[in-house]
Amino acid sequence: MKQNNFKIAVFAGDGVGPEIMKEALKILKLIANKKNINLQLAEGLVGGSAYDHFGVPLPDSSLELALQSDAIMLGAVGGPKWEALDYSLRPERALLGLREKLGLFANLRPVVAFDELLDASPLKKNVVHGIDLMIVRELTGDVYFGKPRGVTKGKDGKRTGVNTMVYSEDEISRIAVRAFEIARTRKKNLLSVDKANVLESTELWRNVVTEVGRNYPDVTLKHMYVDNCAMQLIRNPAQFDVIVTTNLFGDILSDEAAMLTGSIGMLPSASLGENTALYEPIHGSAPDIAGLNIANPLATILSVALMLRYSLSMPQEASLIEKAVADTLKEGFRTQDIHQQDKKLIGTEKMGDAVAKNLCKLLN
Ligand code: NAD
């Protein structure tokens, strides 16, 4: 029987976090009401607001809440108020702590070019048109965690810096399985990105992804070197469906891909583990516009769609949210960050209302 009871941890965070989360929850509650889903929304503190209250950015109570939830919604953390703190106490440490403790090993970043926003891209309209890609980045391995690491001083007094690029077979097959499964729900094209011509750890990456691919004969698997992929993302980004890659390459390629559409306030993300997942917009806490009711809530609303698709087994409802966002843009509604001449400038709350209204029409 399909599950219809879910516990969702809600961490609004700092800066614009509470404003954009309010609109995202509006959409989530609407779906729950219309589809008779029993949602338990449990709010907790992370980031700077948690530091102010508990003296740490990720209190045990919040971690416990995250561990007990089916999924986690996060706004954003950080801001100038906490910048002078020791690194271990900075708001951003909460994100690293959650990733580590929840074992969030797969980071998903969809990039979709909405027809109405093609002008926002730094690239030509005809290049951006039709972009609908998903980057699946491995998140817990590679050179960021490999040992040995550090800076040492030799007898001659000169320093040497070292980091280790390392991947085990199991780490690679785990992310490959996720990527193939995701490709299966899309256009069934998976591109694995590596540097197998010069780096042995990514030669293993290529071999293991190929081996996993034998279980997915319905998905077309191709390989590409990372330098070529960086170029192709600018030359012809619409050619891609799903891209799976290592932590380091994914870090760089996903930021490059994010810029293709030119609007940071539009891009959602998901970080998946074995037992739970975290959903958040890719942007930060935007302290420069916090409290002004002008932040774009669409990235967070689109993160709700990802949560429905990847954690709550509600792919149709996820697509309806995405369609409601597209319809709202078609009607000409814009927050300040994506505003163009002749469009209707509205604030955070009104944008949430406009999407909710369109979603209601689609759900009826
Ligand atoms: P940022 O993403 O917060 O803001 C960059 C620029 O984009 C700003 O001009 C901001 O106003 C604008 N912007 C961001 N989101 C927007 C939205 N939804 N609508 C309209 N405009 C938006 O990046 P930053 O300024 O480098 O960082 C601010 C704080 O956020 C820092 O403390 C940083 O460490 C933190 N941060 C947190 C996360 C996270 O929580 N996942 C990610 C990145 C940065």
Image (cartoon, grey):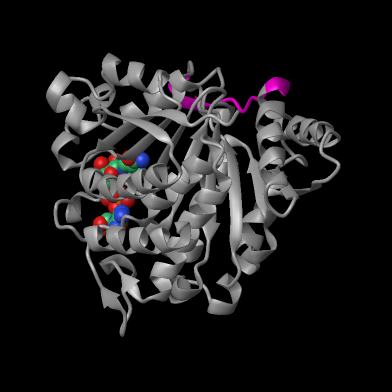
User: Residue 263, position in %: x, y?
Assistant: 40, 63
Number of marks in the image? 0
Could you tell me if residue 238 is visible in this image? yes
Pick the residue in front: 66 or 110: 66
Give the x, y percent position of residue 334. 31, 70
Please determine whether, in this image, residue 98 is positioned above or below residue 249: above
Residue at the (18%, 54%) spot, across then down: 288
Most common secondary structure along the magenta stretch: loop
Question: Where does the N terminus fall, quadrant-wise?
Answer: top right
Q: Position of residue 8 (x, y in %)?
A: 38, 30
Residue 259 in view, yes or no: no
Magenta residues span 156-170
Quadrant position of residue 337: bottom left
Where residue 56 sits in the image (x, y, percent)?
Answer: 22, 20
Q: Is residue 157 magenta?
A: yes
Residue 108 drawn above or below residue 158: below
Foreground residue among 293 and 212: 293
Instruction: Indicate the quadrant containing the C terminus: top left, top right, bottom left or bottom right.
Output: bottom left
Residue 76: say if magenta.
no
Residue 177 vs 282, above or below: the answer is above
Residue at x-position 26% and y-position 18%: 59
Q: Is residue 234 left or right of residue 294?
A: right
Q: Residue furthest bottom?
A: 342
Image-based side of 22 in relation to 252, left or right = left
Of 41 and 130, nearer the camera is: 41
Q: Nearer the viewer, residue 319 or 270?
A: 319
Residue at (29% x, 14% y) in the render: 60
